[in-house]
Image: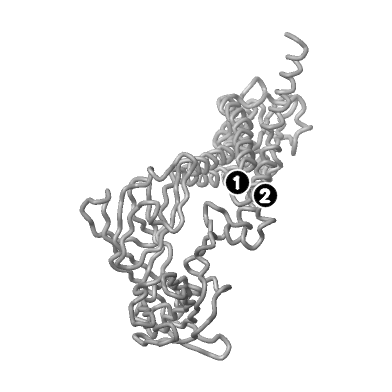
Amino acid sequence: MSMNELRGRSLFRWAWRQLTSMRTALMLLLLLGVASIPGSLFPQRSQNPMKVADYFAKNPTLATWLDRIKIFDVYSSPWFSAIYLLLFISLIGCVLPRTVEHIKALGAKPPLTPKFLDRMEFPNTVEVDKKVALDKAEQWLRSKRFRVRREAGAISAEKGYSRESGNLLFHLSLILILIGVGVGSLFGMKGEAIVSVGDRFINTPTSYDSLGFGKFQSENSLASFSLVVTDFKAKYDLKTNAPSDYKLSVLAANPIGSKEVARTIKVNSPLTYGNTKIYLQANGYSPMVTIRDKSGKIAFQGATVFLPQDGNLTSTGAIKLPDMNPQMGFVATFIPTYDRNSKRGAFSTYPEVLDPRLLFSAWVGNLGLDSGQPQSVYRLNTTKMSRIALKQLQLHESYNFGEGSITFEGWKPWVNLQIVNDPGKFYSLYGAILAILGLLLSLFTRQRRIWVKVGEKVEIAGLAKNGTPGLEEELAELKKSLEGDK
Protein backbone atom coordinates (compact mmCIF):
# COMPACT_ATOMS: atom_id res chain seq x y z
CA MET A 1 0.00 0.00 0.00
CA SER A 2 1.43 3.37 -1.01
CA MET A 3 2.10 6.27 1.34
CA ASN A 4 -0.57 8.36 -0.42
CA GLU A 5 -3.20 5.66 0.20
CA LEU A 6 -2.26 5.55 3.88
CA ARG A 7 -2.49 9.31 4.15
CA GLY A 8 -5.85 9.27 2.33
CA ARG A 9 -7.25 6.66 4.70
CA SER A 10 -5.94 8.51 7.73
CA LEU A 11 -7.47 11.75 6.52
CA PHE A 12 -10.81 10.03 5.88
CA ARG A 13 -10.81 8.43 9.36
CA TRP A 14 -9.97 11.75 10.97
CA ALA A 15 -12.76 13.52 9.04
CA TRP A 16 -15.23 10.75 9.92
CA ARG A 17 -14.35 10.96 13.62
CA GLN A 18 -14.82 14.72 13.55
CA LEU A 19 -18.15 14.48 11.71
CA THR A 20 -19.57 11.77 13.98
CA SER A 21 -18.59 13.42 17.25
CA MET A 22 -21.37 14.64 19.51
CA ARG A 23 -19.85 18.12 19.50
CA THR A 24 -20.18 18.29 15.70
CA ALA A 25 -23.77 16.99 15.85
CA LEU A 26 -24.71 19.72 18.34
CA MET A 27 -23.01 22.37 16.20
CA LEU A 28 -24.88 21.15 13.11
CA LEU A 29 -28.17 21.15 15.02
CA LEU A 30 -27.53 24.75 16.07
CA LEU A 31 -26.50 25.64 12.52
CA LEU A 32 -29.73 24.09 11.16
CA GLY A 33 -31.74 26.31 13.50
CA VAL A 34 -29.81 29.40 12.39
CA ALA A 35 -30.24 28.41 8.72
CA SER A 36 -34.02 28.22 9.26
CA ILE A 37 -34.22 31.87 10.36
CA PRO A 38 -34.29 33.36 6.82
CA GLY A 39 -37.29 31.15 6.08
CA SER A 40 -39.28 33.02 8.73
CA LEU A 41 -37.94 36.47 7.89
CA PHE A 42 -38.42 36.35 4.12
CA PRO A 43 -41.46 35.12 2.14
CA GLN A 44 -41.08 31.65 0.65
CA ARG A 45 -42.19 30.71 -2.87
CA SER A 46 -43.61 27.40 -1.71
CA GLN A 47 -45.88 29.15 0.79
CA ASN A 48 -46.73 32.58 -0.61
CA PRO A 49 -45.48 33.38 -4.13
CA MET A 50 -47.50 36.62 -4.13
CA LYS A 51 -45.45 38.04 -1.26
CA VAL A 52 -42.27 37.04 -3.05
CA ALA A 53 -43.46 38.94 -6.12
CA ASP A 54 -44.28 41.97 -3.95
CA TYR A 55 -40.81 41.83 -2.42
CA PHE A 56 -39.25 41.82 -5.90
CA ALA A 57 -41.42 44.80 -6.89
CA LYS A 58 -40.38 46.83 -3.84
CA ASN A 59 -36.72 45.75 -3.64
CA PRO A 60 -35.70 44.57 -7.14
CA THR A 61 -31.92 44.78 -6.69
CA LEU A 62 -31.79 43.24 -3.22
CA ALA A 63 -34.33 40.56 -4.14
CA THR A 64 -32.24 39.51 -7.14
CA TRP A 65 -29.17 38.96 -4.96
CA LEU A 66 -31.19 37.18 -2.27
CA ASP A 67 -32.72 34.93 -4.89
CA ARG A 68 -29.28 33.88 -6.08
CA ILE A 69 -28.56 32.38 -2.66
CA LYS A 70 -32.04 30.81 -2.44
CA ILE A 71 -33.34 33.01 0.39
CA PHE A 72 -36.87 32.70 -1.04
CA ASP A 73 -36.50 28.89 -1.25
CA VAL A 74 -34.64 28.25 2.00
CA TYR A 75 -35.88 24.76 2.78
CA SER A 76 -35.13 23.40 -0.69
CA SER A 77 -31.82 25.23 -1.10
CA PRO A 78 -28.56 23.26 -1.55
CA TRP A 79 -26.95 24.81 1.54
CA PHE A 80 -29.90 23.98 3.82
CA SER A 81 -30.08 20.45 2.41
CA ALA A 82 -26.33 20.04 2.97
CA ILE A 83 -26.64 20.98 6.66
CA TYR A 84 -29.63 18.68 7.01
CA LEU A 85 -27.84 15.70 5.45
CA LEU A 86 -24.63 16.31 7.43
CA LEU A 87 -26.63 16.42 10.65
CA PHE A 88 -28.40 13.19 9.67
CA ILE A 89 -25.09 11.44 8.93
CA SER A 90 -23.45 12.85 12.06
CA LEU A 91 -26.23 11.63 14.34
CA ILE A 92 -26.25 8.16 12.79
CA GLY A 93 -22.46 7.85 12.93
CA CYS A 94 -22.44 9.10 16.52
CA VAL A 95 -25.40 7.26 18.01
CA LEU A 96 -25.45 3.85 16.31
CA PRO A 97 -21.98 2.72 17.51
CA ARG A 98 -22.85 3.89 21.02
CA THR A 99 -26.12 1.97 20.83
CA VAL A 100 -24.33 -1.24 19.83
CA GLU A 101 -21.84 -0.84 22.68
CA HIS A 102 -24.64 -0.11 25.13
CA ILE A 103 -26.56 -3.23 24.08
CA LYS A 104 -23.41 -5.28 24.70
CA ALA A 105 -22.97 -3.61 28.10
CA LEU A 106 -26.52 -4.49 29.15
CA GLY A 107 -25.56 -8.15 29.38
CA ALA A 108 -22.12 -7.56 30.88
CA LYS A 109 -21.22 -7.90 34.53
CA PRO A 110 -20.35 -4.85 36.64
CA PRO A 111 -16.63 -3.98 36.72
CA LEU A 112 -14.37 -5.64 39.26
CA THR A 113 -14.03 -4.18 42.75
CA PRO A 114 -11.21 -1.63 42.96
CA LYS A 115 -8.20 -2.51 45.06
CA PHE A 116 -8.42 0.64 47.18
CA LEU A 117 -11.98 1.58 48.14
CA ASP A 118 -10.80 4.57 50.15
CA ARG A 119 -10.15 6.34 46.85
CA MET A 120 -13.80 6.06 45.83
CA GLU A 121 -16.70 8.26 46.99
CA PHE A 122 -17.95 8.13 50.60
CA PRO A 123 -15.76 5.21 51.80
CA ASN A 124 -16.77 3.72 55.13
CA THR A 125 -16.33 0.65 57.34
CA VAL A 126 -19.15 -1.54 58.62
CA GLU A 127 -19.31 -3.33 61.94
CA VAL A 128 -20.73 -6.65 60.81
CA ASP A 129 -19.84 -10.33 60.93
CA LYS A 130 -17.53 -10.97 57.98
CA LYS A 131 -19.05 -14.40 57.34
CA VAL A 132 -22.48 -12.99 56.55
CA ALA A 133 -21.51 -9.53 55.30
CA LEU A 134 -21.46 -10.40 51.60
CA ASP A 135 -24.70 -12.43 51.80
CA LYS A 136 -26.53 -9.58 53.50
CA ALA A 137 -25.04 -6.99 51.13
CA GLU A 138 -26.02 -9.02 48.06
CA GLN A 139 -29.55 -9.46 49.34
CA TRP A 140 -29.92 -5.74 49.99
CA LEU A 141 -28.40 -4.72 46.67
CA ARG A 142 -30.60 -7.06 44.68
CA SER A 143 -33.69 -5.73 46.50
CA LYS A 144 -32.67 -2.26 45.26
CA ARG A 145 -32.43 -3.56 41.66
CA PHE A 146 -28.64 -3.47 41.45
CA ARG A 147 -26.86 -5.78 39.05
CA VAL A 148 -24.49 -7.76 41.26
CA ARG A 149 -21.13 -9.34 40.54
CA ARG A 150 -19.81 -11.42 43.42
CA GLU A 151 -16.18 -12.44 43.63
CA ALA A 152 -14.12 -13.95 46.41
CA GLY A 153 -14.30 -11.49 49.28
CA ALA A 154 -15.98 -8.67 47.34
CA ILE A 155 -19.16 -7.54 45.65
CA SER A 156 -19.41 -5.09 42.77
CA ALA A 157 -22.90 -3.73 42.04
CA GLU A 158 -24.23 -1.26 39.52
CA LYS A 159 -27.60 0.20 38.50
CA GLY A 160 -28.90 3.02 36.35
CA TYR A 161 -28.19 1.53 32.92
CA SER A 162 -31.46 3.06 31.76
CA ARG A 163 -29.86 6.51 32.02
CA GLU A 164 -27.68 5.74 29.00
CA SER A 165 -30.65 3.97 27.39
CA GLY A 166 -32.69 7.18 27.71
CA ASN A 167 -29.83 9.25 26.35
CA LEU A 168 -29.50 7.00 23.31
CA LEU A 169 -33.28 6.85 22.85
CA PHE A 170 -33.36 10.65 22.76
CA HIS A 171 -30.71 10.86 20.04
CA LEU A 172 -32.21 7.99 18.03
CA SER A 173 -35.55 9.81 18.21
CA LEU A 174 -33.93 12.89 16.69
CA ILE A 175 -32.93 10.73 13.74
CA LEU A 176 -36.53 9.52 13.47
CA ILE A 177 -37.76 13.13 13.49
CA LEU A 178 -35.29 14.01 10.73
CA ILE A 179 -36.53 11.02 8.73
CA GLY A 180 -40.11 12.23 9.18
CA VAL A 181 -39.25 15.73 8.01
CA GLY A 182 -37.34 14.32 5.04
CA VAL A 183 -40.14 11.96 4.00
CA GLY A 184 -42.67 14.79 4.27
CA SER A 185 -40.59 17.16 2.15
CA LEU A 186 -40.00 14.50 -0.52
CA PHE A 187 -43.38 12.78 -0.73
CA GLY A 188 -45.85 15.26 0.81
CA MET A 189 -48.10 18.04 -0.44
CA LYS A 190 -49.88 20.96 1.16
CA GLY A 191 -52.46 23.33 -0.27
CA GLU A 192 -55.09 25.82 0.80
CA ALA A 193 -58.34 26.87 -0.79
CA ILE A 194 -61.07 29.30 0.22
CA VAL A 195 -64.54 27.95 -0.61
CA SER A 196 -67.82 29.80 -0.06
CA VAL A 197 -70.99 28.05 1.08
CA GLY A 198 -72.75 26.62 -1.96
CA ASP A 199 -69.57 26.32 -4.03
CA ARG A 200 -67.83 23.15 -5.17
CA PHE A 201 -64.17 22.29 -4.63
CA ILE A 202 -62.58 19.75 -6.97
CA ASN A 203 -59.17 18.47 -5.95
CA THR A 204 -57.24 19.70 -8.97
CA PRO A 205 -54.34 22.18 -8.99
CA THR A 206 -56.47 25.00 -10.43
CA SER A 207 -58.84 24.88 -7.45
CA TYR A 208 -56.16 25.87 -4.93
CA ASP A 209 -55.19 29.35 -3.77
CA SER A 210 -51.75 27.98 -2.84
CA LEU A 211 -50.28 24.56 -3.50
CA GLY A 212 -46.88 22.99 -2.89
CA PHE A 213 -45.53 19.53 -3.69
CA GLY A 214 -42.63 17.49 -2.35
CA LYS A 215 -39.65 16.73 -4.55
CA PHE A 216 -41.09 13.40 -5.71
CA GLN A 217 -44.72 14.48 -5.93
CA SER A 218 -46.63 16.18 -8.75
CA GLU A 219 -50.11 17.20 -9.84
CA ASN A 220 -50.82 13.58 -10.79
CA SER A 221 -50.43 12.48 -7.18
CA LEU A 222 -53.45 14.44 -5.87
CA ALA A 223 -56.18 12.31 -4.31
CA SER A 224 -59.38 12.11 -6.34
CA PHE A 225 -62.23 13.79 -4.45
CA SER A 226 -64.63 16.72 -4.64
CA LEU A 227 -66.57 18.68 -2.02
CA VAL A 228 -69.70 20.81 -2.11
CA VAL A 229 -69.90 23.15 0.90
CA THR A 230 -73.55 22.97 1.94
CA ASP A 231 -73.49 24.73 5.31
CA PHE A 232 -71.19 26.31 7.86
CA LYS A 233 -72.10 27.12 11.46
CA ALA A 234 -69.91 28.97 13.92
CA LYS A 235 -70.70 29.43 17.60
CA TYR A 236 -69.15 32.23 19.64
CA ASP A 237 -68.95 32.99 23.34
CA LEU A 238 -71.30 35.89 24.10
CA LYS A 239 -68.92 37.36 26.68
CA THR A 240 -65.54 37.03 25.00
CA ASN A 241 -66.61 36.76 21.31
CA ALA A 242 -64.16 33.85 21.07
CA PRO A 243 -65.20 30.93 18.83
CA SER A 244 -66.50 27.90 20.74
CA ASP A 245 -67.35 25.55 17.88
CA TYR A 246 -67.08 25.31 14.09
CA LYS A 247 -69.07 22.85 12.01
CA LEU A 248 -68.75 22.47 8.24
CA SER A 249 -71.23 20.33 6.33
CA VAL A 250 -70.20 19.06 2.89
CA LEU A 251 -71.26 16.63 0.20
CA ALA A 252 -68.15 14.62 -0.58
CA ALA A 253 -67.44 12.39 -3.56
CA ASN A 254 -64.48 10.01 -3.58
CA PRO A 255 -63.41 9.46 -6.30
CA ILE A 256 -64.53 12.45 -8.35
CA GLY A 257 -67.80 11.69 -10.10
CA SER A 258 -68.95 9.05 -7.63
CA LYS A 259 -72.02 9.33 -5.43
CA GLU A 260 -71.87 12.28 -3.01
CA VAL A 261 -72.08 11.51 0.70
CA ALA A 262 -72.90 13.98 3.48
CA ARG A 263 -69.88 14.50 5.74
CA THR A 264 -68.99 16.85 8.61
CA ILE A 265 -65.64 18.57 9.16
CA LYS A 266 -64.64 20.19 12.45
CA VAL A 267 -61.46 21.90 13.60
CA ASN A 268 -60.03 18.80 15.27
CA SER A 269 -61.88 16.31 13.11
CA PRO A 270 -60.62 16.46 9.49
CA LEU A 271 -62.05 14.56 6.55
CA THR A 272 -59.62 11.83 5.52
CA TYR A 273 -59.01 10.07 2.22
CA GLY A 274 -56.03 7.74 2.57
CA ASN A 275 -53.04 9.86 3.58
CA THR A 276 -54.82 13.08 2.54
CA LYS A 277 -56.56 15.07 5.27
CA ILE A 278 -58.90 18.03 4.76
CA TYR A 279 -58.78 20.46 7.69
CA LEU A 280 -61.10 23.33 8.53
CA GLN A 281 -58.64 26.14 9.20
CA ALA A 282 -60.44 29.51 9.17
CA ASN A 283 -63.64 31.26 8.15
CA GLY A 284 -64.94 34.62 7.01
CA TYR A 285 -67.54 36.32 4.85
CA SER A 286 -68.02 36.99 1.14
CA PRO A 287 -70.27 40.07 0.64
CA MET A 288 -72.61 39.81 -2.34
CA VAL A 289 -73.03 42.84 -4.58
CA THR A 290 -74.56 43.76 -7.92
CA ILE A 291 -72.69 46.36 -9.97
CA ARG A 292 -74.25 47.99 -13.06
CA ASP A 293 -72.71 50.27 -15.67
CA LYS A 294 -74.14 53.56 -16.94
CA SER A 295 -76.67 51.81 -19.15
CA GLY A 296 -77.97 49.66 -16.28
CA LYS A 297 -76.38 46.49 -17.61
CA ILE A 298 -75.02 44.16 -14.93
CA ALA A 299 -71.22 44.31 -14.96
CA PHE A 300 -70.73 42.09 -11.91
CA GLN A 301 -73.01 40.07 -9.68
CA GLY A 302 -72.00 37.61 -6.97
CA ALA A 303 -69.94 37.07 -3.85
CA THR A 304 -66.34 38.19 -3.32
CA VAL A 305 -64.11 36.71 -0.64
CA PHE A 306 -62.98 39.26 1.96
CA LEU A 307 -60.21 38.58 4.49
CA PRO A 308 -60.81 39.05 8.26
CA GLN A 309 -58.73 41.74 9.96
CA ASP A 310 -59.66 41.06 13.59
CA GLY A 311 -61.38 38.55 15.87
CA ASN A 312 -64.79 40.07 15.18
CA LEU A 313 -64.33 39.39 11.43
CA THR A 314 -64.14 42.96 10.22
CA SER A 315 -63.08 42.02 6.68
CA THR A 316 -61.49 43.80 3.75
CA GLY A 317 -61.28 42.95 0.07
CA ALA A 318 -61.34 44.24 -3.48
CA ILE A 319 -63.69 43.96 -6.43
CA LYS A 320 -62.13 44.41 -9.88
CA LEU A 321 -64.00 45.12 -13.11
CA PRO A 322 -61.46 44.98 -15.96
CA ASP A 323 -64.18 44.69 -18.66
CA MET A 324 -65.85 48.01 -17.86
CA ASN A 325 -64.90 51.04 -19.90
CA PRO A 326 -63.13 52.70 -18.19
CA GLN A 327 -61.87 49.98 -15.85
CA MET A 328 -63.21 50.13 -12.29
CA GLY A 329 -62.35 48.72 -8.89
CA PHE A 330 -63.72 48.84 -5.37
CA VAL A 331 -61.81 48.76 -2.09
CA ALA A 332 -64.33 47.61 0.52
CA THR A 333 -64.78 46.63 4.15
CA PHE A 334 -67.50 44.26 5.35
CA ILE A 335 -68.65 44.75 8.96
CA PRO A 336 -70.79 41.89 10.35
CA THR A 337 -72.11 43.75 13.42
CA TYR A 338 -71.75 47.47 12.89
CA ASP A 339 -70.56 50.06 15.38
CA ARG A 340 -68.62 53.31 15.13
CA ASN A 341 -66.77 55.72 17.39
CA SER A 342 -64.59 58.76 16.89
CA LYS A 343 -61.30 56.91 17.55
CA ARG A 344 -61.72 53.65 15.63
CA GLY A 345 -64.21 54.66 13.04
CA ALA A 346 -66.44 51.81 11.84
CA PHE A 347 -65.78 48.36 13.33
CA SER A 348 -67.51 45.09 14.17
CA THR A 349 -68.50 44.26 17.76
CA TYR A 350 -69.40 40.60 17.19
CA PRO A 351 -68.28 37.93 14.68
CA GLU A 352 -71.80 36.89 13.63
CA VAL A 353 -73.78 38.91 11.09
CA LEU A 354 -76.29 40.89 13.16
CA ASP A 355 -76.17 44.39 11.64
CA PRO A 356 -74.06 44.24 8.44
CA ARG A 357 -72.56 47.20 6.59
CA LEU A 358 -70.49 47.49 3.44
CA LEU A 359 -68.04 50.39 3.33
CA PHE A 360 -66.38 51.02 -0.02
CA SER A 361 -64.44 53.44 -2.15
CA ALA A 362 -64.90 53.29 -5.93
CA TRP A 363 -61.93 53.83 -8.24
CA VAL A 364 -61.70 54.35 -11.96
CA GLY A 365 -58.63 54.09 -14.21
CA ASN A 366 -56.06 51.42 -15.08
CA LEU A 367 -56.22 48.31 -12.85
CA GLY A 368 -52.69 47.33 -13.93
CA LEU A 369 -53.69 43.77 -14.76
CA ASP A 370 -51.81 43.89 -18.09
CA SER A 371 -48.45 44.85 -16.55
CA GLY A 372 -47.27 41.24 -16.28
CA GLN A 373 -46.83 41.55 -12.51
CA PRO A 374 -49.04 39.20 -10.46
CA GLN A 375 -51.60 40.91 -8.22
CA SER A 376 -53.40 39.82 -5.11
CA VAL A 377 -57.13 39.32 -5.63
CA TYR A 378 -57.70 40.85 -2.20
CA ARG A 379 -56.02 44.20 -2.95
CA LEU A 380 -56.47 46.94 -5.52
CA ASN A 381 -53.54 48.74 -7.14
CA THR A 382 -54.74 52.36 -7.20
CA THR A 383 -51.50 53.99 -8.41
CA LYS A 384 -53.04 54.69 -11.83
CA MET A 385 -56.63 55.21 -10.67
CA SER A 386 -58.79 58.01 -9.29
CA ARG A 387 -61.36 57.72 -6.52
CA ILE A 388 -64.85 58.71 -7.59
CA ALA A 389 -66.97 57.57 -4.64
CA LEU A 390 -66.85 56.84 -0.90
CA LYS A 391 -69.94 55.35 0.69
CA GLN A 392 -71.43 53.10 3.37
CA LEU A 393 -74.30 50.75 2.48
CA GLN A 394 -76.82 48.85 4.58
CA LEU A 395 -78.29 45.54 3.44
CA HIS A 396 -80.19 45.84 0.12
CA GLU A 397 -79.21 49.50 -0.21
CA SER A 398 -77.94 50.86 -3.55
CA TYR A 399 -75.74 53.78 -4.47
CA ASN A 400 -75.42 55.54 -7.82
CA PHE A 401 -72.08 57.01 -8.84
CA GLY A 402 -70.90 58.59 -12.06
CA GLU A 403 -70.00 55.35 -13.84
CA GLY A 404 -72.89 53.19 -12.62
CA SER A 405 -74.37 51.79 -9.40
CA ILE A 406 -73.66 49.22 -6.69
CA THR A 407 -76.16 47.29 -4.55
CA PHE A 408 -75.32 45.44 -1.32
CA GLU A 409 -77.29 42.19 -1.76
CA GLY A 410 -76.13 40.11 1.22
CA TRP A 411 -73.29 37.79 2.21
CA LYS A 412 -72.11 34.18 2.15
CA PRO A 413 -69.85 32.49 4.70
CA TRP A 414 -66.59 31.00 3.41
CA VAL A 415 -64.16 28.53 4.90
CA ASN A 416 -60.46 28.02 4.37
CA LEU A 417 -59.69 24.36 3.68
CA GLN A 418 -56.18 23.07 4.24
CA ILE A 419 -55.49 19.87 2.29
CA VAL A 420 -52.41 18.05 3.53
CA ASN A 421 -50.68 14.82 2.61
CA ASP A 422 -47.73 14.40 4.98
CA PRO A 423 -46.58 10.77 5.08
CA GLY A 424 -43.71 11.68 7.40
CA LYS A 425 -45.74 13.26 10.19
CA PHE A 426 -46.21 10.01 12.11
CA TYR A 427 -42.45 9.42 12.10
CA SER A 428 -41.98 12.92 13.50
CA LEU A 429 -44.79 12.45 16.04
CA TYR A 430 -43.47 9.13 17.32
CA GLY A 431 -39.94 10.55 17.29
CA ALA A 432 -41.03 13.52 19.41
CA ILE A 433 -42.83 11.26 21.91
CA LEU A 434 -39.85 8.91 22.18
CA ALA A 435 -37.47 11.85 22.49
CA ILE A 436 -39.43 13.20 25.47
CA LEU A 437 -39.52 9.75 27.09
CA GLY A 438 -35.80 9.30 26.50
CA LEU A 439 -35.04 12.73 27.93
CA LEU A 440 -37.11 12.05 31.06
CA LEU A 441 -35.45 8.67 31.50
CA SER A 442 -32.02 10.22 31.13
CA LEU A 443 -32.72 13.09 33.53
CA PHE A 444 -34.37 11.17 36.35
CA THR A 445 -32.34 7.93 36.38
CA ARG A 446 -29.44 7.83 38.84
CA GLN A 447 -26.51 5.77 37.65
CA ARG A 448 -24.14 4.53 40.37
CA ARG A 449 -21.83 1.77 41.52
CA ILE A 450 -21.43 0.33 45.00
CA TRP A 451 -18.67 -1.97 46.25
CA VAL A 452 -18.49 -4.12 49.33
CA LYS A 453 -15.12 -5.63 50.25
CA VAL A 454 -14.26 -8.03 53.08
CA GLY A 455 -10.63 -7.99 54.24
CA GLU A 456 -9.25 -7.06 57.61
CA LYS A 457 -12.49 -5.11 57.90
CA VAL A 458 -15.70 -4.75 55.90
CA GLU A 459 -15.50 -1.74 53.61
CA ILE A 460 -18.11 -0.07 51.43
CA ALA A 461 -17.79 2.73 48.91
CA GLY A 462 -19.47 3.98 45.77
CA LEU A 463 -19.23 6.06 42.64
CA ALA A 464 -22.00 8.28 41.30
CA LYS A 465 -21.65 8.70 37.54
CA ASN A 466 -22.42 12.18 36.23
CA GLY A 467 -22.37 13.51 39.79
CA THR A 468 -26.01 12.60 40.51
CA PRO A 469 -27.02 13.11 44.15
CA GLY A 470 -28.23 10.44 46.60
CA LEU A 471 -25.25 8.09 46.71
CA GLU A 472 -24.23 9.07 50.26
CA GLU A 473 -27.73 8.38 51.57
CA GLU A 474 -27.85 5.04 49.76
CA LEU A 475 -24.52 3.96 51.26
CA ALA A 476 -25.75 5.02 54.69
CA GLU A 477 -28.86 2.90 54.16
CA LEU A 478 -26.69 -0.09 53.13
CA LYS A 479 -24.52 0.33 56.22
CA LYS A 480 -27.55 0.51 58.45
CA SER A 481 -28.96 -2.66 56.86
CA LEU A 482 -25.69 -4.55 57.35
CA GLU A 483 -25.30 -3.47 60.97
CA GLY A 484 -28.94 -3.98 61.81
CA ASP A 485 -28.70 -7.51 63.23
CA LYS A 486 -25.21 -7.38 64.78
Front residue of 438/241: it is 241
Relative horizontal placement of residue 477, taking residue 380 as reference (left or right): right
Tell me if residue 482 comes above or below residue 190 in the rendering.
above
Q: Image quarter for residue 99?
A: top right
Residue to which mark 1 is pinned: 444
Q: Is residue 435 above or below residue 294?
A: above
The label shown at residue 99 is none
The front one of 325 and 279 is 325
Q: In this view, does 37 lie to the left or right of 369?
A: right
SS class, disc 2: helix
Question: Percent from the top left, x then y, of residue 415?
Answer: 39, 66
Q: Can residue 238 be seen in this view?
A: yes
Residue at 57%, 54% (x, y): give it. 44
Residue lying at 46% horizontally and 43% vertically, measured from the top left: 424
Q: Label 1: few (<14), some or many (≥20) within 10 Å?
A: few
Alpha carbon distance from label 1 to label 2: 30 Å
Q: Which quadrant holds residue 471?
A: top right
Above or below, 230 relative to 259: below
Q: Residue furthest bottom?
A: 342
Residue 231 on image: x %, y %: 29, 68
Disc 2: which residue: 34
Count all numbered tags in the image, as a single digit: 2
Res. 160 in view: no
Q: Where is residue 396 in the image (x, y as percent from the top left)?
A: 34, 85
Three-letter code for the amino acid on which mark 1 is drawn: Phe
